[in-house]
Amino acid sequence: MFNIVNVMYLFNKLVHEKYSDCKADDPSPRDHEMANQLMTALELLINSSEIIEGDITLEIDEYDDGDSSYTADSDDEEICTIRNHSYSYKTMCEIVQYANTHQFSTVKNRYRLIKQKSQLRRIRKYVRQQGTKRQKLEELDRFVFHEFNQARNKCLPIHDRDLRRLAIKKAREMNLQNFVASSFWLLNFKRRHHITSRKVTKLVTKNYVEDRNQIIKEETMFLQKAEKVIPRFKPTHILNADQSAFNYEEPSTRTLSIAGEKTTLSRVISTGATTHSHTIMPILNMNGKIVGPLFVCLQEASGRLGPRVSRTIYRAENIHVTCSKSGKLTKSHIQYWAKEVLRPSVQENCLLFLDSWSGQTDPTSIDEAFNENIQCELLQIPPKTTADIQPCDKYFFRQWKYFYQMCFDRVAIDQLQVDLRLRNNILKLHSLIHNQLSSDRFARMIKYAWYSCGYIKKDPGPFENVRNICFSFEVDSCSVAGCDDGSFICCSWCDKILCFHHFFVADHKHI
């Protein structure tokens, strides 16, 4: 055993030699006083802790019910383990069954860790009790988790009270006495299986759940079909196009506020603008680029752009504008898009992935825009699978919407004199977003959209998204000389930090 006084003496000596010119000679009264205090503390710690083989253990049995009325047998762990080998309940049943028809000497030869009849008696006891308490708790855990997965696979809601009810029911069936499914057990159960409370973000019907296996089968078959067709085309001419609706005013759905308030409010210019929408339709290629101009369909009461509107409308090379009464596309819009946007954007045969929306399932809508020199082969993504195997839906539109909302948030919080709901401002905003996302810095991000759907087999590697590239910087002022406004965006092309005025109002673009 170490002499604690000598330890304190050496410590004191080191301190004196390091921080003082004087030397420490024999242990001083102060050394003895500090040693006594340290010994007292150690004795208190030793007397209040459980020491096993020299180690202090603070471990809690992860299957323990945590209730004062629930206690494990004192010999539970000893009987579970024979000669440092733990037997499962299934194995113990096999041993008992074998021992019922054979002599003990034969049992010892087959199960060499069993040396005494008392060990076999213990195994028989646990078989009669349907296993040890630990094994019962493990079985109960597996049962509750299985029932939880069954409920979630059917998209059914399940709560803490349901987990506790299932656990107590199973405990009664297994004759697991004094188990009450306490809050402590429930907390540990959820931690073990990474279960947490989530807000429901989508409601589905029973048919959706029942058809899910069929949907997965169709996804697999479509990916196999695409895998055979893709090698015939260059990545630059393997295309995906899709529609997405954007509200004329896009308020933030989250905000910092005071904890505990009953109602959290967010101000908008017009509630009607949050329900009326327009549609955009970009084209992506498998090489990680946006192809051609952006197709934008505005909502116009008359269903057309009048002469006055046509004269004053915002124009840019990277957008192509049309309109409808609803702001949504129809079959005639798809024919127009194929002729005016898709066909001029390709120079050789291409492969086009489109979803199964009724307005674009007719292949003649695409074929009529092409001639004998250049053909477009259409692959129709099966219904209800777009969330999984449609590259635009899988990842790309999420980035576009994030950019779009950041602009609305900045105008709102700074109360800028810019009305983004106006027709020309909507067009300018989409033109700017299209230009920013066309930068080579987003190539890997777009490739990832294809990879995550299963069309690209090789992981494109680490990539930066819109938030990383455009909205994560520490500079707090605009980089334009003479501008004192706060920073808003980092340009993905030139890396300049720009305020909202020099980005949006000044129409900052790169060609």
Image (spheres, rainbow, N blue to C red):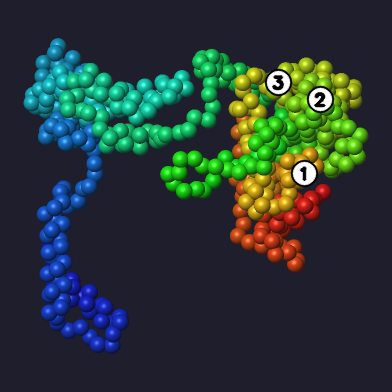
Locate residue 207, reporting x and y percent.
54, 14
Please rate how many residues cluster around mark 2, counting C-alpha atoms within 10 Å: few if below 14, some from 14 to 19, many from 20: some
Residue in the foreground of this view, choosing between 74 and 280: 280
Sequence order check, earlier mark of 2 and 3: 2
Q: Residue furthest top?
A: 101
Could you tell me which secondary element the residue under label 3 belongs to? Answer: loop
Q: Where on the picture, by quarter, is residue 386?
A: top right
Specify the amino acid type for callout 1. Asn
Please rate how many residues cluster around mark 3, counting C-alpha atoms within 10 Å: few if below 14, some from 14 to 19, many from 20: some
Could you tell me which secondary element the residue under label 1 belongs to? Answer: helix
The residue shown at (30%, 80%) is: 18
Above-or-below relation of 444 to 394:
below
Residue in the foreground of this view, choosing between 255 and 404: 255
Specify the amino acid type for callout 3. Trp
Question: Disc 1 or disc 2, which is closer to the eye?
Answer: 1
The residue shown at (81%, 25%) is: 333
Q: Real-space Cα distance between discs 3 and 1?
A: 29 Å
Specify the amino acid type for callout 2. His
Locate residue 119, reporting x and y percent.
11, 26
Dot label at residue 357: 3
Q: Is residue 461 visible?
A: no
